[in-house]
Image (cartoon, helix red, strand yellow):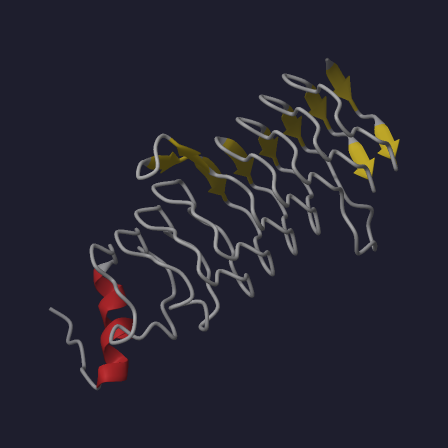
Amino acid sequence: MNTVGEVFSQYDFTNQDLSNAYFKQCKFYLCDFSRADLRDARFEGCSFIEQGEIEGCNFAYADLRDASFKDCQLSMANFKGANGFGIELRGCDLKGANFVQVHFSNQVSSRMYFCSAFITGCNLSYTNFEKQCIEKCELFENRWIGANLSGASLKESDLSRGEFSADAWGQFSMQGCDLSHCELEGLDIRRVDLTGVKVCEWQQEQLLAPLGLIVMPN
């Protein structure tokens, strides 16, 4: 199924099989994708919200395994409860999107699991990632301003060149993360576990200044 340049307004895609479908430069206004099978579906340059609206499309409990969204407008989209294992979101505007209870992990056993998600170059401002587990994933070059990361675990993920609110630090687990080229204002190394975190040499000054230490140039 290949669709180019179509407009869908208040269309009901619930429970439909759209696996492996390809949509390019399509517009979806107030469409309902809840519980749809979107596994391996691809969306390029698509818009999922009409300009000026405050409600996006609904992907609640959809199967989004290995689905790909590139350069898409997904503001205010609702992904609650979706299976997002292996999802690819590249260069998308996801401002205000809801990712509560989305599954980015595959539970192998009661103690073993692994995550898969590729979310890069996206606007994640004011998104809701509360209590999400997105570990060892590509999450670089994203804008996280105002995002709810309370109780989330992003351990060992690549967060490099990301932009975070000063109050974001301490909300989520970041051990082993790559924070290189991130502005670290508000990050208190006395209160946050930074075990294994990677930073650039120039970031040392931001981390040590609150302690009263002055980093001298070599």
Q: Camera-side residue: 213 or 202?
A: 213
Q: Kindly indicate the quadrant of the structure image that contains residue 214.
A: bottom left
Q: Kindly indicate the quadrant of the structure image that contains residue 40.
A: top right
In which quadrant of the rendered image does the C terminus lie?
bottom left
The single residue placed furthest to the front in the displayed view is 110
In which quadrant of the rendered image does the N terminus lie?
top right
**Which percent across, then down, holds residue 35?**
70, 31
The single residue placed furthest to the left in the displayed view is 218
**Which percent across, then down, holds residue 202?**
25, 65
Q: Residue sitting at 58 percent across and 56 percent down?
A: 128
Above or below residue 126? Residue 30 is above
**Which percent across, then down, holds residue 33?**
74, 33
**Which percent across, then down, holds residue 12?**
84, 31
Q: Camera-side residue: 140 or 131?
A: 131
Q: Residue sitting at 48 percent across and 55 percent down?
A: 131
Side of 189 where 101 appears, left or right: right
Q: Residue sitting at 48 percent across and 63 percent down?
A: 150
Count up the numbered dots. Answer: 0
The single residue placed furthest to the top in the displayed view is 1
Side of 52 where 194 appears, left or right: left
Above or below residue 12? Residue 182 is below
Q: Camera-side residue: 151 or 116?
A: 151
